[in-house]
Image (cartoon, rainbow, N blue to C red):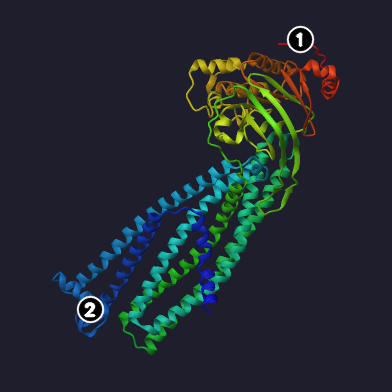
Amino acid sequence: MITQLWDTLQERFKLKAVRRLFEFVEVKKSEVAGLVGFAVLFALFEGVGLSLLLPILQFAESGTSAIQDSGGFIWTTLYQVLGWFNLKPTLVVLLLLAFIPNVLRNVVFYLRTWYNSVISSRIMLRLRMKVVDTVYAADPEFYSRHPVGELVGVVMGQTGAAGSAVLSIINLFGIGLLLIMYAVILLSLSVPLTLVAVFFAAIVSLVNKRVLNWIKENSLKNARLGQELMAKIVERMGQMQLVKLRNTQAEEAAYIEEVTKISQKLSIQASKVGAAVEVIVDPVQMISVFVTLYIGIAVLGSTLAQLGLLMFILIRLNARVKEFNNQLQAITGATSGVRLVNEMFDAATTSNTINSGGREFSGIEEGIELKQLAFDYPDVLSAQGELVSQGKAVLNDINAFIPAGSFTALVGRSGAGKSTLVELLPRMRDVSDGEVLFDDVPIKEYNVGSIRRGIGYVTQSPMLFNDTVYENIVYGLGYEPTEQQVYDALDAAHALFVYDLPQGLNTKLGDRGVRFSGGERQRIALARVLLEDTDILVFDEPTSALDSESEGYIQQTLRALHGKKTLIVIAHRLATVVSADQLLVVDDGKIVERGTHAELMERDGAYANLFQSQLIGVEDPSAVPD
């Protein structure tokens, strides 16, 4: 029986949800103490201010005889206080005494509102950064099942719900104190009338229970809809060129309209439910006032002063009961948003399986060894646990040695596993079996950050921000380069054209560098890598989408770096890599051939077939055009 009662109270006042919220959201004890302190002071001054209205009403009704006629606690206490200051209970004195706590109440209200705002923003910021840090630390697999728009929606939208939820909980506590204060004053006036008021307050709460159940079911649904819509909008706007080319603007707009209408329908239903509650609750509260007044006048024979204060308190009480229920609704709605944040946080935490070692990476002297290396893609699950894509084996029994300062090329058909293989070097992914060694030291012994900073990475699609040329090439550098260093990096990347732009290095690139050609974007990205001046450079199909002129520039850069850096190049255009020290031919997740261009051509195997299929006709590496 006691257990059932406790479970009912926990569900009624959302204690379980509150406990889960405080377990996830970081709220400092000092902040809670401050919030609770202001709530207590507000309730205290509110109670004192209301209590002092009774002596004023009684004095107005009976004059000085009210002191002798009333033996109540309020008059007794008031008379003692007046005696301390040698004051007589005149109307002016009584009004002044009632005015002071009301002024203090308003001061506390101002301070409390300001403090609530400060704490709410702090809580939101801490939670947002907690989620951001965890999402940034997540493995690449995490991003395969969480679109960028969804992440943005949760990080920027739903984290704000945490601060609101915590404030609603503290406000609920403050309102509860006020309700207790009102009950104490009512009890001092009349126990029977207090029981009548509590009875009607319970009816209002029962009506609100149904509303809470509806909000619990639909707020999460609405939050997920918003998350889905944000993900779709960001994704589609990120591919606006495709939308324009396929002339699907109308279809995309129709999807946004459809989802928005569903969300709008839920919001309208919420408004209707809220309005229905008002329609039911207001008459119930009005009846409670009338019934209480009737019992006070006809049955108990209460004085006019008592009835006046009673009516005033009942009006305030009913308003607070309504506010109490509104805060319960706010907590129910806000915890749905926090639940989405919690889901994202748990998913990111679970996917963060790449543990950092303690050894700092400072480059290689001997080389990189891939030893019986294997990699399997795991199953990709949605946030709801549904299978998005089946896992599969990508690499199997990879063995290779890449000498320091050498030029190694990975070639093979699309989907053979080349890009996955080079992603293992900066530990963007971790091997499923085998190991990667740098100078005979297992890669997992190195600090992950130092490994990644020690490898320059140029991808097929240049990774550029909508910022200036300068900010893009110094991004993540860790120090402020000199003008000469910047110039040298741009010169080595054949990107000196930026100095001819009207704003030079301060020219904005646009979204993902859209204002520049593919070759220009690639050379700017290459300049960033060269400015880092790392021992190891990885080029993942850097010329596959470039014109012949831009491809020639990349080839010149590779030749200039040959022997100075450890170059690892993935290339479909084999003319880019015919001068490599070794070519590793990857097929179906395995290295099927290895050797120089001449050796592999003479072998007339997989590489020779690839080379001949491109109709390059280059037998001598020195014949590759500059």
Query: Left or right: 559 with respect to 294?
Result: right
Q: Can see residue 267?
A: no
Measured as percent of width and height from the top left, residue 151 is found at: 60, 45
Point out the residue furthest to the left here. Answer: 86
* Residue toward you, 426 or 16: 426
Q: How many marks?
A: 2
What residue is pinned by disc 1? Answer: 623
Numbered circle sitting on residue 530: none
Q: Amino acid at mark 2?
A: Thr
What residue is pinned by disc 2? Answer: 76
Measured as percent of width and height from the top left, residue 425 is found at: 64, 31
The reply to whether callout 1 and callout 2 are in contact (CB within 8 Å) is: no
* Residue toward you, 129 or 437: 437
For mark 2, give the secondary structure.
Answer: helix
Q: Amino acid at mark 1?
A: Ala
Quarter of the image containing the N terminus?
A: bottom right
Measured as percent of width and height from the top left, residue 429 is found at: 65, 37
Mark 2 nearby-residue class (10 Å; few <14, some 14–19, many ≥20): few
Among the two numbered marks 1 and 2 on one chain, the one whose residue lies closer to the N terminus: 2
* Residue toward you, 75 or 121: 121
Point out the residue furthest to the bottom here. Answer: 299
Distance CA(mark 1)–CA(mark 2): 109 Å
The relative height of residue 142 versus residue 367 in the rendered view (above or below) is below
Quarter of the image containing the C terminus?
A: top right
For mark 1, give the secondary structure.
Answer: helix
